[in-house]
Image: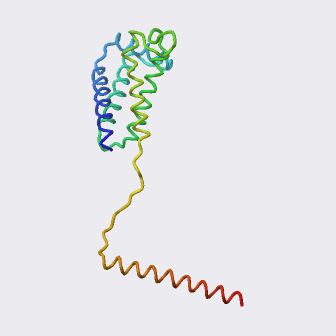
Amino acid sequence: MRISHIPLRLTTGAYILNSGLGKRGLDEESAAGLQQMAANAFPQVMDLDAVRFGKLLSAAEITVGLTLLTPFVPSRLAGLVLGAFSGGMVTMYLKTPGLTEDDGIRPTAQGTPLAKDFWMAGIAAALLLDRKNRTKVKEVKVPAPVKAGAAAAAVKAAKDIKHHKDDKDSKKSK
């Protein structure tokens, strides 16, 4: 993990983990409200019992949060997990009536708390796209006499190759 990824992963991971932990004991009415909101984007969630949906949502948020906070999880994998999660959240935000202005993008007062999901999508993109330079160059210290000897040997080898080529060319022309 790069040092520049720590603030992205720490703040986002802590936020999502806290949200998931807060949903562990959802009552049926609160779970049903969240389920109805999710159903705007993903109608299949209505096939689940509301309490079960709440538990699954809590577990998913805890998993995403812990993935981001765990240092040995590669940043690209953490970005992929966050991207899937935030993509679902952005879809829900965009498809839920009353959360966006008439233009379908800008948030209403009710949608402002959910507009943060665009930031999470941006953080996911940053984690996915920020690639380390995979070319590794190792610097080797060579003592000065060895350098001089190696340079002389390289020059001699180059001359030998040139002379050998010249000899071949002259034999071919005969």
Q: Is residue 165 left or right of residue 109?
A: right
Task: Decide: is 174 above or below 107.
Answer: below
For the image, the number of numbered tags is 0
- Please name whichever residue, 163 or 21, is drawn nearer the observer in this view of the structure: 163
Q: Residue at x 44, y 31 (%)?
A: 84
Is 121 on the left-hand or right-hand side of 139? Answer: right
Q: Name the residue at the right extreme.
A: 174
- Residue 51: image location, x then y, percent: 36, 17
Image location of residue 161, percent across then percent down: 54, 82
Q: Nearer the viewer, residue 5 or 153?
A: 153
Q: How is the image coloured?
A: rainbow
Q: Position of residue 124 (x, y in %)?
A: 41, 33
Q: Which part of the image, by quadrant, shows the C terminus?
A: bottom right
What residue is at 31 percent from the left and 13 percent from the top?
27
Reply above or below: 37 against 63. above
53 to 133, vertically: above or below: above
Question: Residue 150, relative to residue 58: is it above or below?
Answer: below
The percent position of residue 1, horizontal first and vertical second, equals 33, 44
Horizontal side of 147 relative to 156 (left or right) equals left
Q: Determine the image quadrant of residue 125.
A: top left
